[in-house]
Image (cartoon, rainbow, N blue to C red):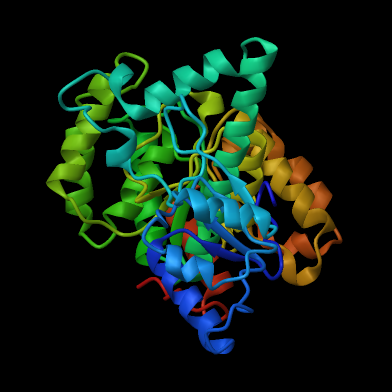
Amino acid sequence: MNSTPALTPLPRVIEIASLRDFDRHATSALAIEGGRLAASMHGWHVQSVDLRGRSTVLEKLRPSGSVFLGCYLEGKIERRLRGGGALVFPEIPGLPFDAYRGELYSWDELYAGILEGSYESVPDARIYAWSFHRLGAGAHDALNAALASTLHDHAIGSRLDSQIREGDLSYAPLVGVMGGHAQQRGGDDFRTAARLGHALAEAGFIVATGGGPGAMEAANLGAYLSAFPLSTLDEALGMLAVEPSFATSITGWARAAARVRNRWPSGTANLGIPTWFYGHEPPNMFATHIAKYFANATREAVLLEKCSGGIVFLPGAAGTVQEIFQDACENYYGAAGRIRPMVLVGIDHWTKTLPAYPLLEELARGRHMGRLIHLVDDPAEAASILVGLNDGGISGVRGLA
């Protein structure tokens, strides 16, 4: 089993995360074999599917080489699968999350009940509390927690890969927006990041962020409202500004975002990839698709790898600097066709406050990545640069008017 399928999908593996997917593949397998018992499930990874109504079908399929993770099965069928060479992973009791979940998260799932209760009562907070206590507990609990969290991250990676390959996130290249978590709602930096997200999504990109507060929330918000005029974005920014920071009250901060989501319940698809490793930083509600991981290292690598349209780096601190050079390392050693554009926003910040750009420029000298690194002051220029580099070469991107 591949622990990080969103990074390196395994060949000849069929990921099945719904009853509909199972029925489609079972019908195809049985048709190929004429309904005989020789029909094979080899390479099937079936995840969090209730198969108690499919026992007759499962009896016709050869189980060798298949994997069932957290599925509901009749007892005799489970015994048949195990006896036939399938790996059957049972449900893990006592978890505040589904280790084998078949979908990415949504804001209303992670924040269920936020308008009635405090943040501490919602699923996102309960999962963080579990990870904080169990992963630091005694050997037995820590082992079970490590197994559960690894299985969970595998499931999230699988669904993210599927969404990017053939789902809601497949229609255009992803562009990453990286920046600090400290930018407060109502501030100029927050508004700038929101307008950047709006411009990128309006140009046809799918915006991806680290899924947290600050610049990440702003970029997801701008992308979410990109089908609306900028006046709508400004109205939403005003609604959020009444709760500037999560540091004062996560509950108030989250409720303000929920009111914006309820005011505009439908928005443009975009991605957030947060982590419970930084559980004190809550995920923002404006990513329509949330791939939340326990392992921050996996989350960082996935986020950088999947941004095929390039990455914009807004002013930030240590985390953003790390992301710049992690991406630069991949580009430094990458083949010519695999290098992703890098656009740093904030000339003073990246040449004086934290002078990452001179080092980045020196690294790029004489290499393929040299023509794909840029330093600008205007986020609108960053969007135009990425459109120019992608337009006509990658489907889904349209020029900025």
Q: Is residue 21 above or below residue 294?
A: below
Residue drawn at x 21%, y 56% is 266
Number of on-image labels: 0
> Whole-percent x and y of residue 381?
48, 58
Q: Quadrant of the C terminus?
A: bottom left
> Closest to the observer: 162 or 309?
162
> Closest to the observer: 110 or 87?
87
**Residue 326 occupies quadrant:** top right
Residue drawn at x 65%, y 41% is 298
Q: Is residue 297 above or below residue 96?
A: below
**Is 68 left or right of 291, judged from the image as shown?**
right
Residue drawn at x 69%, y 71% is 12
Q: Is residue 253 above or below residue 275?
A: above
> Whole-percent x and y of residue 195?
34, 50
Q: Is residue 301 above or below residue 146?
A: below
> Closest to the observer: 138 or 348?
138
- The answer to whether any part of residue 113 appears in the image is yes
> Closest to the observer: 233 or 57?
57
Residue drawn at x 67%, y 36% is 297
**Is 349 left or right of 249, judged from the image as shown?**
right
> Whole-percent x and y of residue 152?
55, 40
**Residue 267 occupies quadrant:** bottom left
- The answer to whether any part of residue 353 appears in the image is no
Residue furthest toward the top? 138
> Whole-percent x and y of residue 285?
32, 39
